[in-house]
Image (cartoon, rainbow, N blue to C red):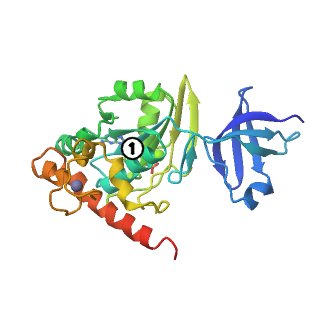
Amino acid sequence: MTAMQGVIVKGIGGFYYALAGDNQVYTLRARGVFRKRKITPLVGDTIRFTPGKGEGEGWIDEILPRRNVLVRPPVANLSYLLIVVAPKPKPDLLLADTLLIEARRQKIAPALIINKLDSDAALCRDIRAQYAGTGDPVVVTSVKSGEGLQSLEELLKRGICCFAGQSAVGKSSLVAAVTGIDLDVGEMSLKIDRGKHTTRHAELLTHDGFQVLDTAGFSLLSQTEAEDPVLLKAYYPEFAPYDSQCRFRPCYHHSEPGCAVLKACACGLIAKERVMRYHQLLKNAKEAWEGRYE
Ligand SMILES: Nc1nc2c(ncn2[C@@H]2O[C@H](COP(=O)(O)OP(=O)(O)OP(=O)(O)O)[C@@H](O)[C@H]2O)c(=O)[nH]1
Ligand SMILES: [Mg+2]
Ligand SMILES: [Zn+2]
């Protein structure tokens, strides 16, 4: 059999499903060499593979160089990361900020989707205001009323878009509403204000010109690679206009006297919630950096 090229659309229990140029999906396994090199094929990877004979599965021979890669959700080669938040379940904006940082680190264009506008318009407005300074696209949507779905569709047409966020914020509902793909959507657990983890695996869905990645919701913050904490502030575009005006250099914008970012925040020019969460992420980043040789 000659080698073929395809894109991994799904991976479950050691099996990978690749969509090839002939529009067929091939079932594959990764050769042992990947395990030896500790490389895991990811949804979104472009691969070269040897198809199986008859009913048997084929083999992944090679993973072509990745444009970018995320650890959580575990996917590669994105154009956009659509970070979904909603008034219900209780929004975890520290997770949203972490995903924004990861996207910038990997040079993936981020966008914020604030879903379930119908359930609490005031909270949606408040979240929107917090992110106005980032300059990223923010789309407020409601799958129930249909609001914002047209704007979301325009974003989705621009490239490979990956939805990410907590369980039950409505990622699968949004994908289904815009693309028409039939997906399982879950319920909220009323007792514990948490999602039920309906989507279990990341899947690249291609349909009608859309290339959309629906992923499993998560809430734990992943500890990413330790990086010098002084670099963290660079992932906050709203700090940039003030960064060079701080008295100390470098300035962490934490509690230094003469800090122009803190001053701008006190004046209401930068959202204080974003700065407070930045301080928390800065603390985590410092701990990770100090413990990096342990
Ligand atoms: N009121 C309201 N409910 C919504 C909206 N969008 C989705 N939901 C509901 O929210 C619940 C969770 O939706 P899902 O699409 O399964 O959420 P998910 O983000 O894919 O969740 P996981 O797959 O667990 O990560 C479902 O009961 C949806 O009907 C919305 O705009 N408004
Ligand atoms: Mg889902
Ligand atoms: Zn400063």
* Residue 115: image location, x then y, percent: 32, 40
* Residue 243: image location, x then y, percent: 25, 48
- For the question of whether residue 244 can be seen, the reply is yes
- For the question of whether residue 168 can be seen, the reply is no
Q: Residue at x 24, y 39 (%)?
A: 132
- Of residues 201 and 126, the one drawn nearer to the viewer in this rendering: 126
* Residue 207: image location, x then y, percent: 56, 27
Occupied quadrant, residue 172: top left
- Of residues 212 and 169, the one drawn nearer to the viewer in this rendering: 212
Report the side of 153 relative to 206 (left or right): left
Ligand 1 lies under 8 Å from the Cβ of mark 1:
no
* Residue 238: image location, x then y, percent: 26, 43
Q: How crowded is the residue under tag 1: few (<14 C-alpha within 10 Å), some, or many (20+)?
A: many
Give the residue number, with chain letter if any, for mark 1.
83
Q: Residue at x 56, y 50 (%)?
A: 201
Q: Quadrant of the N terminus?
A: top right
**Amino acid type at mark 1:** Ile
> Helix or strand or loop: what does disc 1 sit on?
strand
- Of residues 182 and 230, the one drawn nearer to the viewer in this rendering: 230
Occupied quadrant, residue 35: bottom right
